[in-house]
Amino acid sequence: MNTIELNNGIKMPMLGYGVFLVGSQECEYCVSEAIRLGYRLIDTAQAYYNEEGVGAAISKCGIPREELFLTTKVWISNAGEEKAARSIDESLRKLRTDYIDLLLVHQPFGDYYGTYRAMEKAYRDGKVRAIGLSNFYDARFVDLAENMEIKPAVLQLETHVFSQQARMRELIKDYGTRLMAWGPLAQGTDRIFTNETLKNIGAKYGKTSAQVALNFLTGEGIVAIPKSVHTLRMTENLDIESFELTETDREMIRKLDTGLSKVDFNDPAMAKYLLEYDKNFNPDN
Ligand code: NDP
């Protein structure tokens, strides 16, 4: 599996398995299956309410912990230095591990400066190997990156062939921050799996549209974490290193970029939805 080096020298797989909307019950099975197939990077979050399923799978999988790369994210309801610190310990407990490989601030809402300070401390204490951000755009990203001592190693954003994040990719270079694509298959929307450009390119290599879309991202140096609860699709999404797109293929795929994201984090209605998220969706409430 290809890897990239983060700005603190640690290595991270280019392709991983995401578990957003994978129910807590099925999560252990799905992550076990993903690891069995060869995935080594698993992306979860406190707000997915399935960290325990991930923890159960990694503790039973038989793969040495150091060969796995675990990402989780601190949710808004745990924002602030003390609460975030407690939540990191809680994530460690649920994930059944002594350290998290990559810890992200999930959303730029609430006291995310306090959250980041707690993450810096966890990093120095050896509980976390790298820290970063998710869904921070433009000035919000720059403000935090400029003000905090440890520069974000990773920025996780909605990124796919229809939203290639050219501006943000340029901006984060100054901090040595690497882009990690959430929704790398556009969450299955915009008819991505039957897109003519992707299909025609794939036909040359005997690959599917999904494989071309993922190969495009990793080839651009972007980490991708597709999610599927189906073994066949997990296998398909993992098998993207056996072919190489030409520069002409890449140019054609670059033309699919709309420059637009599906989720607008500047929308006040989205802010309210996210601020109420834990109250509405946390099964423990
Ligand atoms: P993806 O772009 O990975 O798309 C997932 C959808 O595509 C599912 O409906 C899945 O269905 C389907 N699918 C997957 N592979 C195939 C395939 N080969 N052929 C056909 N259909 C396929 O969207 P996600 O939102 O899940 O993003 C990936 C990960 O990114 C998440 O799981 C999560 O870890 C992370 N994420 C982070 C966010 C953040 O705010 N930081 C926000 C959203 C996601 P099925 O499962 O039925 O196969």
Image (spheres, helix red, strand yellow):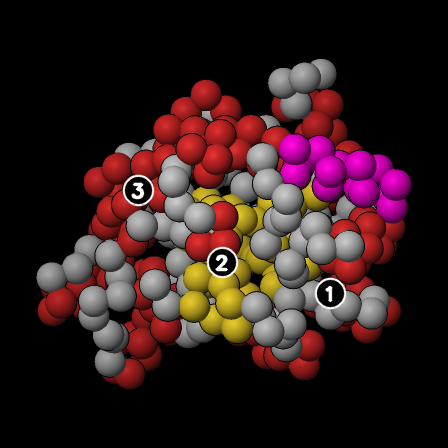
Q: Which mark is residue 141?
A: 1
Between disc 1 and disc 3, the foreground one is 3
User: Label 1 amino acid?
Assistant: Phe
Q: Which residue is mark 3?
A: 36
Q: Position of residue 107 (x, y in %)?
A: 70, 48
Region rendered in magenta: 80-93
Mark 2 CB near ligand 1 (8 Å cut): yes
SS class, disc 1: helix
Task: Please give the name of the residue rendered at 73% of the width and 38% of the height, measured from the top-left corner.
Answer: 89
SS class, disc 2: strand
Going from N to C along the chain, the mark reached first, 1 or 3, is 3
Depth check: give the residue in front, 264 or 124.
Answer: 124
Distance of mark 3 from mark 2, alpha carbons? 23 Å
Q: Where does the N terminus fall, quadrant-wise?
A: bottom left
Q: Counting other residues with Cα less than 10 Å from the Cα at mark 2, is it few (<14), some (14-19), or many (20 or more)?
A: many
Task: Please give the name of the residue rendered at 82% of the width and 55% of the height, measured from the top-left corner.
Answer: 121
Q: Which mark is residue 64?
A: none
Q: Which mark is residue 181?
A: 2
Q: Is residue 82 magenta?
A: yes
